[in-house]
Image: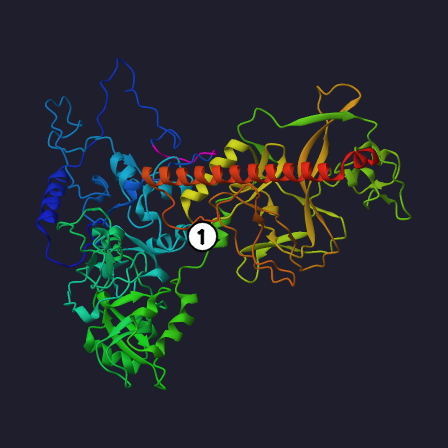
Amino acid sequence: QQEDMEVDAPPSPRKLRDRQALALARVAPPKKELTPKRKGKAPMKKPRKTRKQQKGRGTTGKQMAQPLPSADMLRLTYTVPLRRTAQLKCCILCNEVPDVKMVVKKEAKDADEADPNAAEPEDDGYVTCSVAHCNQRMHPECVEKFICSEYTPKNAQLLFNNAGPVCPAHVCFHCFEERQKNTSRFGRMINCSKCVRTFHVQCLPAGAKTHYTSGKATFVCHCHTEDVLPIKEHMRMKICTECEEDCLEETDSKKDGDARMECRLCTNVFHKRCAFKEVRGLTQAYNFDLCSFCISGSTIVSGQHVLAYCSVATYGHPTGWYPAVALAIKDIPPNIKKILYGRKLGRVGWIPVMWVWKAAAKPFYDVIHRSRVQRITLSSYKNMQTDDFKKEVAELAQKFRPPTADFDNLAMMQTIKFISKNEYVGMPRRRLFMLKIDFECDCKPDANGFKCSTLKCSNRENGFECAPGCDEKGGICMNRGMQRVSNKEKFKLDEAPKGKGMGVFATETIGKLEYIFEYCGEVISKEELEKRQERMRQLRSLDEWTFAMGIAAGLTCDARFKGSAARYVNHSCAPNAQVKCVEVPVYMQNCPRGKICYETRLKVTALREIKAGEEITFKYELEKASGLALDVCKCGAKNCVGKIGAASKKDTNKDERYEDGMTFSDEEEEMDESVVEKKNQKGKKATAAKKTQQTVKRRASAIALGPAAKKSK
């Protein structure tokens, strides 16, 4: 299949060498080597390994956070590796040539034994991809060092929550680069026939060419264009592609880091301090002559707002950079498509765009080379030729994020394990405590025979569920919902409006203070919670959310990987339900006589009457952890705050989790520590000065009042 995916082009010397090695390997297929027969018995067979016993396979229940790359590692990057024949016989992350070693059998006793000319690849210590049914191999050193844009094998491992690294064939590179990493896992994908990148069908780069080989759809991405156009000085951008500061040629700074560097493949410019120190995987030497977009192969998809260079004066506007929209070939009108086919429409690396001129009543279409199409940023207005388009670019600043694939809620649900009770992780047994039996309420049944249905019940008010003895006294106790097993559910899971993902909706009318369901998950310790928060910081994904709720002192209920239907309840600033920690009676055989064991659980009850078809919501009451961002609230209530939760008092860090440069060098860390120490010393001095001023004032007031004031006191 890998050979069929190659495009019809003259093979390179490396491909010829690979095919010769494959031809030698396929002269005689290797047969199974049997062990010598024992007397009167069948030959021994090796026990088959299970999936968990295979190297680097399977998932783990605990979340082990992987270390972030060092500061030097962040200044190092790799280019996108090329696709080669016999991909499974070599590392997918480096330029290794497949080497099939010949294993010659010297003696053959029987004719059924292995052919002496058969070739078998030896085990050279490769690491196999941890995704099931994927046999792609990687070098251990490549797994540790490889980084290209947002993708690293370790980061993909955190995303899949696997025990081993994940190769780039299982994620969409465009969604992964835009930090929609959970979205990148699902959906139909198509791979490039010349490099190892994979994309969603709706995320194919503009300027790519799709073709079918042996009934399988593949494409050639825009990075493999054969057309190289000259770039003149007046076409260059005016801002740095990394820091978005002015990057003009006339600079008065004598620092080497402020030097203006030009990309040799596109119109981007950048400061030398903003460039990578080293780039691996290039065919030519790296002399700070490539921007980060050309190195990592950043994509521009159809429907994305871009800046395109217009080389022809149109509608009275001079040549220069203007805002446009990248298009797919199917979105171009048929009459315009006939004209554009003569302008290299459909060739690899040529992007069809549409300019919407203010002075024209009709849009203007053209085909532009990828080197003259750039992304729109907040500072893109500095590249405009006229001032008329600055306001238009400012309006487009809110839409500058490229479109990605839609989040597949149903596919994400399949990765979650539904449970009906809490699971304790890293603990030998669940946490219980004992109380006396006489801790009961004095509620009496009403006219309908129900009791303990209001907050007048002492147990309900104090956060306890009544014991079974409450029913024995007469009447039906309404404060024992978590102890009763009911097969009838009054809710269902469905997609929520306003882009909130999945939600929980009532199928029947739910009364006030009525029990709905339990918020179940994995009960973890404080140390395990910090590990999972560190995983979220390192994952750097915009579609990764927290499902942790405090359940007891030092314990947290996390429903990220295992949970009940309550994990899908959305936040609202005007909720109709609430979550409370409730002590539920648990009867144990070894419990002392005269006492009852209680377990702390999370109970979801209705704050008011919830009608059928209404979405069930409660308030999250989240606290911003250090280095993590608060999600935007989409409840639409009148008293909506705009964000879910608030920053904790201990958290003084205002940085969001998706800001670049979260890892600093040792020198920067020492500088930061010194600055913090100076601030602490200044604060201590200020507090000491305030205390001395207060004592001086007290003494002065005491001296002014004299002994008469002391007697009155």
Residue range (magenta): 56-62
Assess disc 1: are there few (<14), some (14-19) or many (≥20) residues with their C-alpha within 10 Å of its C-alpha: some
The residue nearer to you, when weighing 226 against 535, is 535
Q: Position of residue 129 (x, y in %)?
A: 32, 39
Question: Which residue is rendered at x = 65% and y = 63% of the image?
Answer: 638
The residue nearer to you, when weighing 386 against 360, is 386
Classify 44 as above or below 149: above
Residue 38 visible? The answer is: yes
Residue 304, quarter of the rendered image: bottom left
Question: Which residue is rendered at x = 26% and y = 15% of the image?
Answer: 38
Q: Mark 1 highlights which residue? A: 542
Classify 289 as above or below 669: below
Question: Which residue is rendered at x = 63% and y = 55% of the image?
Answer: 572
Identify which amino acid the numbered label 1 is placed on. Leu
Residue 214 visible? The answer is: no
Residue 92, quarter of the rendered image: top left
The residue nearer to you, when weighing 625 against 541, is 625
Q: Position of residue 28 (x, y in %)?
A: 14, 37
Q: Residue furthest left?
A: 13
Q: Is residue 584 magenta?
A: no
Q: Is residue 61 magenta?
A: yes
Label 1: which secondary element: loop
Relative placement, left or right, of 298 versus 466 is left
Classify 509 as above or below 109: below
